[in-house]
Amino acid sequence: MGQAVATLAEERGHAIHTVITRIENDGGRALTRERLRGADVAVEFTRPDAAVVNLERLLALDLPTVTGTTGWTENLPRVTALVRQRGGALLHAANFSVGVHLFIRTAQELARCFKGRAEFDVSIHEEHHQTKVDAPSGTALLLQRHLWEAEPGRRFPITSIRAGDTPGTHTLTYESQHERVTLGHLTKSREVFAAGALAAAEWLPGHTGVFTFEDMLFGLSR
Ligand SMILES: NC(=O)c1ccc[n+]([C@@H]2O[C@H](COP(=O)([O-])OP(=O)(O)OC[C@H]3O[C@@H](n4cnc5c(N)ncnc54)[C@H](OP(=O)(O)O)[C@@H]3O)[C@@H](O)[C@H]2O)c1
């Protein structure tokens, strides 16, 4: 993802101030004031076990930061507290595709329609490439949270497959004995994530607080 964002950013006329790789960044040690001086915004795509320390270092340097790394959100309260303490800016998203967020909104409407219909079993299924570290995907968890808003108390179980090189599919299924209703989203190319992350990086400077991609897409009040 880092490479995809950097390539697209240059195509759009942005200058890449610096690229930081894992080998030099144990414990976030490459994220120094000297190295990042002059940058307008940081874009962080790494791994669940590296993201929090990277975010803490970037926020301590008062650099607006966009992260797409998944699998770390149990630490979101800690990171949010740091953003507030510093008066900084963070935008985080498990998925930077516009289509997936419209899919989630549509799924929420579907859940409202099926509310209380116990004859239908409901399930979320997601598939990603075999190198994806976390499961369920951050997007599936986000979808599940939005479905709970539509029908609190209902179970929305998630199944995950890690195989091949698919960038990601998410499917919501309502199934009874005689019929099945499915709503799905399939990512055809990772470029869509890079485009969304870059749009977020263009949007974030000048804002203060913790934002999601949904805040940016649909407005802060939603
Ligand atoms: N939000 C979205 O739309 C979206 C879309 C796609 C992916 N993602 C998420 O974004 C993350 C990255 O995905 P990816 O497909 O790019 O994974 P990837 O191909 O595994 O790349 C991760 C990169 O991060 C590097 N890295 C690991 N720890 C680091 C550290 N401490 N400092 C600097 N670099 C470090 C890795 O270096 P090495 O190769 O040397 O280990 C690798 O180059 C995952 O959490 C994934 O789930 C989100």
Image: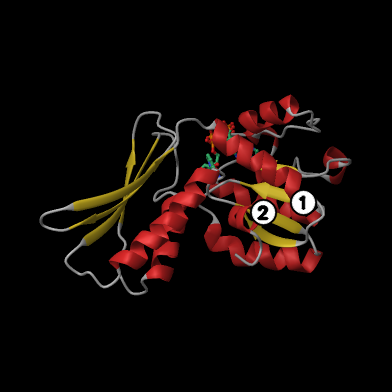
Q: With 7 as the anchor, is 207 left or right in this view?
A: right
Give the residue pinned by disc 1. 64
For the residue pair 181 and 25, the one nearer the viewer reads as 181
For the residue pair 193 and 42, the one nearer the viewer reads as 193
Distance CA(mark 1)–CA(mark 2): 8 Å
- Under tag 1, what secondary structure? loop
Q: With 14 as the anchor, is 173 left or right in this view?
A: left
For the residue pair 126 and 176, the one nearer the viewer reads as 176
- Label 1 Cα crowd, 10 Å radius (few <14 / some 14-19 / many 20+): many
Q: Position of residue 26 (x, y in %)?
A: 66, 41
- Depicted 181 relative to depicted 193: above or below: below
Q: With 97 as the anchor, is 169 left or right in this view?
A: left
Seen at 79% across and 28% down, the residue is 13
Give the residue pinned by disc 2. 91
Badge 2 amino acid = Leu
Q: Position of residue 42 (x, y in %)?
A: 74, 43
Q: Position of residue 86 (x, y in %)?
A: 80, 64
Residue 191 occupies quadrant: top right
